[in-house]
Image (spheres, grey):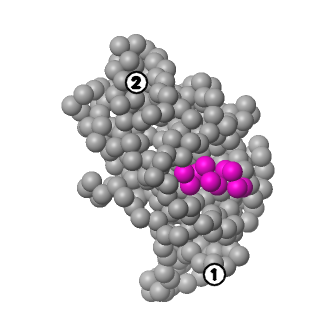
């Protein structure tokens, strides 16, 4: 642990909050203010670089994957009704990104709550007009939290891999393709990836010749031993710094036989899910991987401080 004065902070260059290089491990510095000394406490954290995976030449035909694309959807607050903000984002952001995807999911499952059968059929028809993949909508009349809908979606899935995404955001055109490539090559239990804010209608997001994979365990479990409460605080801050989206996690389907998402937490169930996965499978290199590239555009939602 090092102590530095604030004037030194501006000299450290970070990309998306993470210093990316080709070394065996990369160094991230967490900054915390020591209230007594008014100096910054710098905690050095090594984030292990696993591999740069060559990006396949994009095919003109859709690549078939064994990924179930799961979309939790809460409609009871009426923000998702036609004409409202979230519905417009669904139609103008998410569905076009689904249509532009280089890879087809095995199936698309929308786990809807606050939704009746008629609404489910309308949404199924709408989504089917943007994708050739099978579309299933599982309606639930009562309102439900995101964790409950994600669990229902996982239970209904038939894919070997389950990838979660939100109905009011946009996927990178090659998101499913890159995830499929990584799961075939490395067989991780779970994968998280970077994101960025949506800039108007720009959804192309060019990638380089390869994409970078890191050991995500290093982000959520610092090398120093901490209490569970302290560890949760630090990993929440790391999420905000590393530009990773916990709600867009992709997992082996078998994970849900052992770990489910909290159905009672209003916010932070995705954060808790990652910690539970780490507890069950242990801090192994293939437990949690992190793709540094932003594979999604965050269009709308919570802009407050990171969940603690």
Determine whether, in the image, residue 249 is placed left or right of residue 94.
Answer: right
x, y (%) of residue 55?
56, 63
Q: Residue at x 63, y 78 (%)?
A: 22
x, y (%) of residue 28?
59, 73
Give the prevailing secondary structure in the magenta stretch.
helix
Q: Is residue 120 magenta?
A: no
Q: Residue at x 60, y 28 (%)?
A: 157
Q: Is residue 179 magenta?
A: yes
x, y (%) of residue 159?
63, 34
Q: Residue at x 44, y 83 (%)?
A: 10
For residue 107, say whether it is visible.
yes
125 w.r.t. 185: above or below: above
For residue 308, say whether it is visible.
no
Which quadrant: the N terminus? bottom right
Q: Nearer the viewer, residue 93 or 178?
A: 178
Determine whether, in the image, residue 262 is placed left or right of residue 203.
Answer: right
Label 1 belongs to which residue?
2
Q: Which mark is residue 124?
A: 2
Question: Which comes before the other along the chain, label 1 or label 2?
Answer: 1
Quadrant of the rendered image containing residue 23: bottom right
Residues in magenta, as a range? 177-186
């Amino acid at each position: 642990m090092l102590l530095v004065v604030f004037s030194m902070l501006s000299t450290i260059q970070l990309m998306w909050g993470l210093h990316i290089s080709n070394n065996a491990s990369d160094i991230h510095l967490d900054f915390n203010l020591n209230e007594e000394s008014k100096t910054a406490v710098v905690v050095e954290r090594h984030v292990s670089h696993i591999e740069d995976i060559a990006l396949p030449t994009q095919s003109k035909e859709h690549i078939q994957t064994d990924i179930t694309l799961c979309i939790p959807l809460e409609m009871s607050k009426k923000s998702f009704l036609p004409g409202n903000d979230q519905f417009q984002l669904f139609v103008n952001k998410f569905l076009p990104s689904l249509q532009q995807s280089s890879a087809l999911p095995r199936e698309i499952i929308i786990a809807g709550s606050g939704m009746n059968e008629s609404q489910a059929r309308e949404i199924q028809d709408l989504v089917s007009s943007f994708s050739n993949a099978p579309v299933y909508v599982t309606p639930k009349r009562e309102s439900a939290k995101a964790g409950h809908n994600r669990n229902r979606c996982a239970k209904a899935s038939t894919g070997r891999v389950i990838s979660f995404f939100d109905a009011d955001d946009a996927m990178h055109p090659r998101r499913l393709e890159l995830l499929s490539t990584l799961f075939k090559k490395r067989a991780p239990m779970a994968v998280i990836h970077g994101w960025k804010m949506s800039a108007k209608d720009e959804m192309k997001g060019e990638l380089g010749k390869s994409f970078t994979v890191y050991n995500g365990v290093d982000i959520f479990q610092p090398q120093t031993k901490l209490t569970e409460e302290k560890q949760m605080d630090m990993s929440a801050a790391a999420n905000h710094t590393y530009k990773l989206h916990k709600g867009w996690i992709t997992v082996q389907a078998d994970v849900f036989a052992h770990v489910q998402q909290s159905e009672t937490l209003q916010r932070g169930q995705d954060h808790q899910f990652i910690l539970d996965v780490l507890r069950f499978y242990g801090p192994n290199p293939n437990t949690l991987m992190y793709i540094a590239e932003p594979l999604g555009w965050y269009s709308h939602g919570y802009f407050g401080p990171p969940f603690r």
